[in-house]
Amino acid sequence: MRRTWLNPCLVSVLAVWACGATPDASKADNGRSASVVPGGKIECSPNRKAGEPFDPPSTSAIPQTEAFVAREHFREDITPAAQVKISWLGATFVRRFAVKIETARDTSLQSYTLRTPSSATEITGDLGIRDETRLADVWCLLRLQGKGESGALEINSSPNIFFVRDAMGELGVVDALWGGAGWEIGASPIGSQQTWPRGTRVFSP
């Protein structure tokens, strides 16, 4: 059997390359884990309609805020008149999140896409998420794609997930999936063993 020998110089070069490439292969360009890919930044205003440009308020202006009552927005309704078609609300979401009252205001979220299947704990660790998303922010994005239009949210088989605090102040995962007839909204604990698939869109402040 023929044995293949490597030139000693070539072996040294390959060894140096491997040592140098290993750390980089596990990190994205901005130092984040390679399991997530940064996407675009999304601006959303409660009063903005689909197709309208985002016009952020000036720093001197007093921000306009109003109460956001979750149960008045997150309701199962797939009729043509529905602002956001919702075909299903999970029991956990209804019990833990739909009872919240928040403040609606202009928001800015960063999007990411999962390269590899990951749990919620792994995702928050990779992204170093410190601030949670509000339900008002989730609704703001849903309203721009209320009938399944293309936009920041995935409308294929990939879910969109947000890290939101429930009515008790505990951080959880809210997921939104376009199911064809409408949006399917669910929720799960942050420590759940559920693995989010490759291609999942993640949003955080």
Image (cartoon, grey):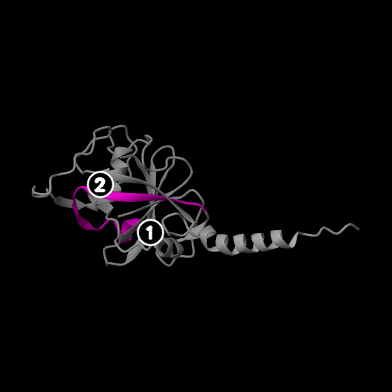
Residue numbers of the magenta segment: 93-115
Picture coordinates of residue 143, whole percent (x, y): 28, 40
Amino acid type at mark 1: Val
Choose the circle earlier in sequence order: 2 or 1: 2
Picture coordinates of residue 17, whole percent (x, y): 60, 60
Q: Quick one: label 2, few (<14), some, or many (20+) residues within 10 Å?
A: some
Determine the secondary structure under disc 2: helix
Q: Which residue matches tag 2?
A: 73
Picture coordinates of residue 112, whole percent (x, y): 41, 51
> Where 78 falls versus 122 (above or below)?
above
Q: Quick one: label 1, few (<14), some, or many (20+) residues within 10 Å?
A: many
Amino acid type at mark 2: His
Q: Nearer the viewer, residue 186 or 57?
A: 57
Please give the name of the residue rendered at 34% of the width and 50% of the height, measured from the top-left corner. Answer: 110
Q: Nearer the viewer, residue 198 or 112?
A: 112
Q: Which residue matches tag 1?
A: 173
Q: Nearer the viewer, residue 5 or 88?
A: 5
